[in-house]
Amino acid sequence: MLVSGSQLVKLLPNKRPCRDCGFPTCFAFAMKLASGGATVDKCPHLSPETRAKIEELLIPPMKFVTIGTGGNKLEIGNEEVIYRHEKTFVHEPGIALLVSDKESDEEIQGAISRIRKLHYAWVGTMLRANLLAPYFESGDKPRFIAVVKRLRESIDLPLVIISEDAEALFAARDICADRQPLIYPITQGNIDTAIPKIKEKPTPVGVRAESVEGLVSLTTKLKASGIDDLVLDPGSKTMLEAIRDQTLIRRATLKQTFRPLGYPTMAFPCFMVRDNPLKEMLIASLYVNKYAGIIVLSNLDPNHMLPLLVQRLNIYTDPRFPMAVEEKYYEIGEPNEESPVLMTSNWALTYFVVSSAIESTKIPTFLLVQDAEGLGILTGWAAGKISGSTIAKLVKNCGIEERVKHRQLVLPGRIARISGATMEALDWKWEVTVGVREATAIGAFLPKYAKELKGKIAAGKAVPE
Amino acid sequence: MEYKAPIESNTGIVNVVTLGKPGGETVRIGGENTLPFHFFDDGSWPNPSVFALQILDREPPEDLPAFLYEPFKDVLHDPAKWAKKVEEFDYVDAIQLYLLSTDPADRGSAPEKAAEVTIKVAEATSLPLIIYGSGDPDKDAKVLPAVCEAVDGMNYLIGPVQKENYEVVGKAILAHGLFASAQTPMDINLLKELNVKLGHFFPLERIVIDPLSPALGYGIEYTYSLMERIKQLGEIIKDKMTQMPMIADFATEIWRSKQARENEEQGILWEAMTSLSLLTAGANILTHRHLKSMKLVKEMYESEVKQWQK
Ligand code: SF4
């Protein structure tokens, strides 16, 4: 739980609201503190102990960790809820590609170009994988160093350096420390020798134990040495262990404010599943839902990546704000001046469903999307966001009148009642047809309508007099 | 600092529903008082979630990719043979019969015809049936009562029961000893309201919640979070109107999407990921169209479920 204003006010000297902090009351100051809008040093009437206590309470329960530098850096942690309906998940997990140093130079070059090329346009955003994870498997240290060097030089993505051999791990770290790689794993076995080496050139650290409980002594020790940019691996081997371990860490972090587990986590579908790429992707998708901050995969097959990246986008969508698409006309297929013009609202879900239904008819179409502040058609109308005059404004301003030679518009069946008002607002220059109520019926409707439209155009009746 | 594992327990228990005709195979769902996969908490999830393969009452529309129905390509013209063939795949727990041809936007076939097909399918298979109308509330108000009569006493699940037709459809379901799948469009208040209305004459223990399940990429996050909430309200707050088991019926939605249709492996993953997400959100029944995607999720689920039931 994040600390609340009412918890903090108990620690303030409520006896004499003096306004020295610039707020009218101690309570107002406490509220501001809790929301991050003020710092505790603004109140001069606190003992050093109280001040320290408040500062401790104000630290977010889950550490914020940055891996990499520059525009592609990965930021994880700082999550505030266990279930997304409580507020929202904040930082999408990084998807990493494992690159074994046993692979040939050509294979490694292939991996680099694959991750570089791999991106998908998805309603206004670009989906892509974001990390490379060089993996020391060859037993040949110079080879590993060469691979890390190569990755570092050929692509500007954050690195997760994986090596059970601590010497190789730190040697690899040394050649790219300025790029803030995550080094993994720090374990019970190597922690004592690792601590001084980490402190030489501090970078984020992946900590591994065989259980959630096993992580506690490790993170406590690291923190005591001033090493606090940690990412946790509780060593889960199966789907159920993954859910258990991730859930317990998230609960301990948020419900108990248990600092030794208050860090983001990392997961390794690449090691949990061998030789079953689809299953590996399913485990990865589970980790998207269940709290991982970094997910390491053995392969980036383009046929497998799109669903995973879409899932990541979906789960990290803020449920408090309906997803909306931009108001404009969209081209589905390659529409021309005789193509139908349909209209819908800008709630992303409505847009998706309608556009994909149109797409599967294979009839090139213009789809006008009306800004309804992210509401659906019917609710948008009920809330006054969609009306005859808003639709008319959109038709006149979006440029569709230059793209089609007809003046025929199809409204969703659910707002049939405003078809008259729409024509009126368009000065009777457009004719409005009432379409279908459900997107599922577009498949039956659109081919017929397109044919009728063609007939009207041929007969010179597609523009109202 | 000492670590004390944050173990939780809930007192609300999800209703148990047993589907399947007398003498046939039955599936039992519900009965849990833990959240999905939370075998580490105090409590149990005694009845594993159930996987239903969807078949149609007509040959599949031509715009669906051929790979989708490959194993059944010789029987697609005959729903009874299709249903019989499903039994060859032992990881299928139940069959969803989707009466697509009754849809006014499809062939608009008559209620009598739907009843006829349904009874043939029911005779052909010993697996439990989940029988879904087209979703057109007016048409379903005619089709579903005819279907209920045809499968009298067979303990099948009938849906979707919607706010526009719950009285007539609900009464038919009750009169013939069946179970109701109550469907509302992704909203906690609407689904509670429908259950309250049904509850005036229909036993709550015979209801399954269908919150509508869009595909990955097309709004799955709404249903994902809604299912999590429904389960939590039922188990933690003990809200009687959300204590029913849930069905995630995405079989039709997945294959509307271009992404699932354009490439088989991508399609399999599209359906499997949707399924796994809703399974982790708490669904008790999951409907698939692709046999391979079902096999993938079911095998993962089963091998793990066994561990936690020991
Ligand atoms: S300065 Fe301190 S004591 Fe004075 S009003 Fe602000 S919080 Fe209260």
Image: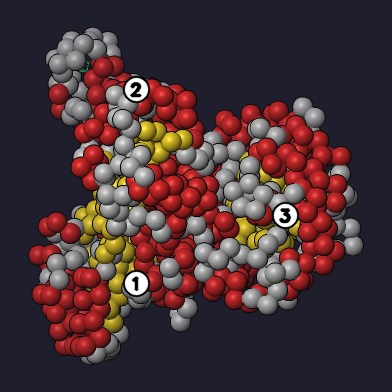
What distance separates the C-alpha of mark 3 from that of mark 1?
Answer: 35 Å
Residue at left offset 79%, top offset 62%:
B121
Is residue B158 visible in this depiction of the protein? yes
A339 to the left or right of B301: left
Tag on residue B130? 3
Based on the displayed image, in which of its 4 quarters is residue B242 positioned? top right
- The three-letter amino acid code for the residue at tag 3 is Ile
Q: Residues within 10 Å of mark 1 (few under 14, many from 20)?
A: some
What distance separates the C-alpha of mark 1 from that of mark 2?
Answer: 50 Å
What distance separates the C-alpha of mark 3 from that of mark 2?
Answer: 48 Å
Q: Is mark 1 within 8 Å of ligand 1?
A: no
Which comes before the other along the chain, label 1 or label 2? 1
Above/below status of A136 relative to B275 = below
Q: Which residue is mark 1?
A: A302
Task: Report the front residue among A114 and A195.
Answer: A114
Q: Are marks 3 and 1 on the same chain?
A: no
In which quadrant will I find the C terminus of chain B?
A: bottom right
Q: Position of residue A105 (x, y in %)?
A: 20, 88
Q: Position of residue A87 (x, y in %)?
A: 40, 37
Query: Given the image, what chain letter belongs to the residue carrying mark 2?
Result: A
B148 to the left or right of B133: right
Q: Residues within 10 Å of mark 3 (few under 14, many from 20)?
A: many
Task: Report the front residue among B109 and A312.
Answer: B109
Residue at left offset 68%, top offset 62%:
B58
Which quarter holds ligand 1?
A: top left
